[in-house]
């Protein structure tokens, strides 16, 4: 296994942000680039709903989505796969739960937050509305933004912000994330080595 691959294997990546921020495009591209399994909250949500769309408004349903997202991620990690999570992650508890999953498996954690201007998001949301059977994406965006909890729980090396989403070519974005993953993973491997060394020999 190469040093770079070892670094990737030591990191769980979660790609988040508001709707229309370009997170899914980035998550798919990154997963393909590093040979990881892409686990997408939208597909989890559809699976849980089973066509009963009214359930999406039930209290606690969004929590169910994130529980199932992380359950699938843990199953993949247990099977030896790299994982890239793709979800908005608007609440602190969702991000903390993802980081806890990484820690349980002796992996570092990297949260990649995609951001775009409201003008860019509005253009993309209008395009979605034109294709959707049930338009209203801008209201979904506004509701999500209103409930977004600032990211204060992560260490600086666990949080990478990418501005302008799809305005940058995916290859540039994935290069940025790969650099952060490699740095994060190598740091974590050093940390584990040091901790194991101190545990055996004292500090």
Image (cartoon, rainbow, N blue to C red):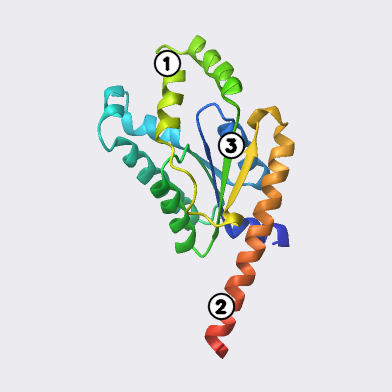
Query: Is 6 placed left or right of 59 in the picture?
Result: right
Q: Is residue 2 visible?
A: no
Query: Is 24 placed left or right of 172 in the picture?
Result: left
Residue in the image at 74% along x and 38% along y: 172
Dot 3 corresponds to which residue? 114
Q: Is residue 150 visible?
A: yes
Residue in the image at 70% along x and 34% along y: 170
Q: Answer whether labels 2 and 3 touch (C-beta < 8 Å).
A: no
Label 1 or label 3, whichever comes before in sequence order: 3
Q: CA distance from mark 2 to mark 3?
A: 33 Å
* Residue in the foreground of this view, choosing between 137 and 48: 137
In what element is the residue under mark 3? strand
Residue 136 disc label: 1
- Residue extending farthest to the top is 130
Query: Is 30 placed left or right of 44 in the picture?
Result: right
Q: CA distance from mark 1 to mark 2?
A: 51 Å
Q: CA distance from mark 1 to mark 3?
A: 21 Å
Label 3, residues with CA under 10 Å away: few <14, some 14-19, many ≥20: many
Query: Is 11 placed left or right of 64 in the picture?
Result: right
Label 2 or label 3, whichever comes before in sequence order: 3
x, y percent for residue 46: 38, 29
x, y percent for residue 163: 65, 35
- Residue extending farthest to the bottom is 201
Quadrant location, the C terminus:
bottom right
For residue 161, above or below residue 6: above
Numbered disc in front, either 2 or 3: 3
Numbered disc in front, either 1 or 2: 1
Dot 2 corresponds to which residue? 195
x, y percent for residue 35: 63, 46
């Amino acid at each position: 296994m190469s040093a770079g691959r070892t670094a990737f294997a030591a990191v769980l990546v979660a790609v988040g942000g508001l709707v229309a921020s370009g997170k899914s495009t980035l998550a798919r591209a990154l997963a393909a680039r590093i040979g990881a399994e892409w686990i997408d909250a939208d597909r989890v949500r559809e699976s849980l709903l089973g066509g009963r769309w009214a359930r999406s408004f039930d209290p606690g349903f969004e929590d169910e989505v994130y529980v199932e997202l992380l359950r699938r991620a843990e199953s993949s990690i247990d099977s030896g796969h790299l994982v890239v999570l793709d979800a908005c992650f608007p609440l602190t508890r969702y991000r903390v739960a993802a980081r806890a999953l990484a820690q349980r498996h002796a992996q570092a954690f990297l949260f990649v937050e995609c951001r775009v201007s409201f003008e860019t998001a509005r253009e993309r949301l209008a395009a979605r509305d034109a294709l959707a059977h049930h338009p209203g994406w801008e209201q979904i965006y506004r509701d999500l933004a209103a409930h977004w909890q600032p990211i204060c729980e992560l260490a600086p090396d666990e949080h990478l912000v990418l501005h302008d989403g799809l305005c940058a070519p995916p290859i540039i974005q994935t290069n940025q994330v790969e650099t952060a993953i490699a740095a994060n993973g190598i740091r974590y491997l050093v940390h584990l080595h040091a901790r194991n060394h101190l545990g055996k020999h004292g500090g």
